Image (spheres, grey):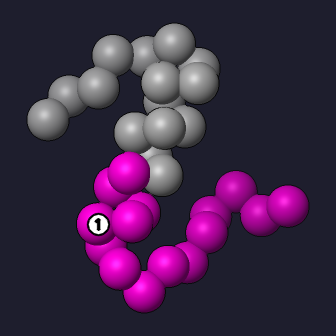
Amino acid sequence: MADIIVVDDETDVAFMIADYLQAKGYRIRM
């Protein structure tokens, strides 16, 4: 699976990144 996922909606990308970081235990910076 590719590390970079292309999505039409930038908001979806932001949520995907947030979920990815939370899964790794990082704190989200808004």
Q: Is residue 13 above or below residue 27?
A: below
Q: Is residue 8 above or below residue 6?
A: below
Residue 2 rendering spot, x and y as whole percentages: 77, 64
- At mark 1, the secondary structure is helix
Q: Residue at x 58, y 24 (%)?
A: 23
Residue 9 rendering spot, x and y as whole percentages: 35, 80
Q: How many marks?
A: 1
Residue 3 rendering spot, x and y as whole percentages: 70, 57
Which amino acid is tagged 1?
Thr
The answer to whether 13 appears left or right of 2 in the picture is left
Q: Is residue 21 magenta?
A: no
Q: Is residue 15 above or below residue 13?
A: above
Residue range corresponding to the magenta coloring = 1-15
Q: Which residue is mark 1?
A: 11
Q: Residue at x 85, y 61 (%)?
A: 1
The answer to whether 21 appears left or right of 29 in the picture is right
Q: Residue at x 54, y 37 (%)?
A: 20
Q: Quadrant of the C terminus?
A: top left
Query: Which quadrant holds residue 8?
Result: bottom left
